[in-house]
Structure formats: structure tokens, C-alpha cells
Amino acid sequence: GLGDVYKRQAHLNLEELDEMKSLLQSSLVHNPNSSDLWYEFMNVTSMLNLPEESLEAAQTLSHLESGNTENLAFLASLYDKTGEKEKAITTYTNCLSIDGDHQKANYNLGVLYYNEAVTVSNIATTDAQKNDVKENLIKAEKYLTQAQNLDSQNVELEMLLSNIQNMK
């Protein structure tokens, strides 16, 4: 049936992606400073759901093209996905120091601080923890407001900012 066709197609795509990954790896041995090859490798490993390999490629790209804000934002999102929050924050901040109007970096950094505030608020009992929640909310609001200024049609941003007001 149709399900089998989709399964075969998905399997074929995985085989093609694995083949592309192998070709890119051998190409990178000969051209280790090729941003284009690293970018393709990052995309392929991302599609194959290999976050560690995508992270390595993104780190290499950030060194080869240190001023490329798209690469920095992607690298920061990979740090976030792999649980390296501090590296994610530092990398988003670096990205925003180059381009303060980078919508995705503002949005993702705001969401990161918001999620941290929500997590801590669920267990906050001490004044220090409650203060930590407030600090994270202030940071979240700053970055999410900037993201909203850059994408005023985003309903999710309105919701997040409203939630922050309710938590303060």
C-alpha cells in the first residue's frame, strides 16, 4: 500500500543521505577549509539526526566564517539542543554582538531564558531562586521584545510576552 511506498522512499532517502555524508567526509579530508563542504556536512548530519556531528561541523564553520551570523545562530541552537545552555547563551550573544537585529538569535535566546525562568519558578522556594526567576524573565522579555519588533506578526511571541507579564 501507500505506507510501504513512503517507507521505501524514506529508506531510500536515508541511504542517499548516508552516501552523501560519506562523500562529504572524504571530500573534507582533502578540503578541510571548505566552508561549502562543512555547510553541506552540517545539513546532512542534521537531517540524519546526528547532533554531535552537526555540532562539530557548525563549530568548524564558526571558525572558518567567524562573522557569519546564520552559522553562529545555528551553532547556538545545536548547543541548546545538546544541553550546553551556557555555550548556547554565549554563542547567541556573540551573534547578536555582530547583528543585534538577528531575529532568530533574539527569539531563541529569549525562549532559552524564558524556559529557564519557568523551570526554576516551578521549584523556587528561596529568595535567591525567586530572584533568579526574575532575572531570567527580564532577559527573556528583552530578547523576545526585540524579536517581536523584527517579526510583529508572530502570535507566539505575543503569547510568550504575555506569559512573562503574568509571571512577574
Image: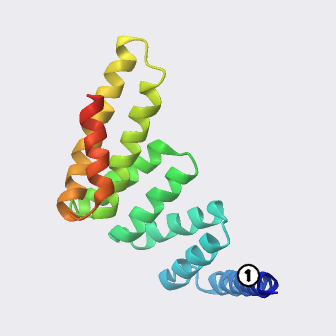
The relative height of residue 16 versus residue 129 in the rendered view (above or below) is: below
Instruction: Classify the position of the C terminus by image quarter.
Output: top left
Horizontal relation, residue 66 to residue 20: left or right = left
* Figure colour scheme: rainbow
Residue 149 is drawn in which quadrant? Answer: bottom left
**Mark 1 belongs to which amino acid?**
Ala
The relative height of residue 86 versus residue 72 in the rendered view (above or below) is: above
Task: Choose between 73 and 147: the one closer to the eye.
Answer: 147
Horizontal relation, residue 36 to residue 10: left or right = left
In the rendered picture of this protein, how many numbered marks are placed on residues? 1
The residue that mark 1 highlights is 10
At horizontal 58% and vertical 79% (from top left) the residue drawn is 32
Residue 162 is drawn in which quadrant? Answer: top left
- The image position of residue 29, as x and y in percent, is 66, 81
- The image position of residue 48, as x and y in percent, is 68, 72
At horizontal 38% and vertical 54% (from top left) the residue drawn is 108
**Extreme-front residue of the structure:** 1
Q: Is residue 33 visible?
A: yes
The relative height of residue 45 versus residue 6 in the rendered view (above or below) is: above
Instruction: Classify the position of the N terminus by image quarter.
Output: bottom right
- The image position of residue 70, as x and y in percent, is 37, 70
Q: Under tag 1, what secondary structure?
A: helix
At horizontal 64% and vertical 60% (from top left) the residue drawn is 52
Dot 1 alpha-carbon crowd within 10 angstroms: few under 14, some 14 to 19, many 20 or more = few
The relative height of residue 82 versus residue 24 in the rendered view (above or below) is: above
Horizontal relation, residue 58 to residue 166: left or right = right
At horizontal 45% and vertical 42% (from top left) the residue drawn is 86
Horizontal relation, residue 130 to residue 161: left or right = right
- The image position of residue 72, as x and y in percent, is 40, 64
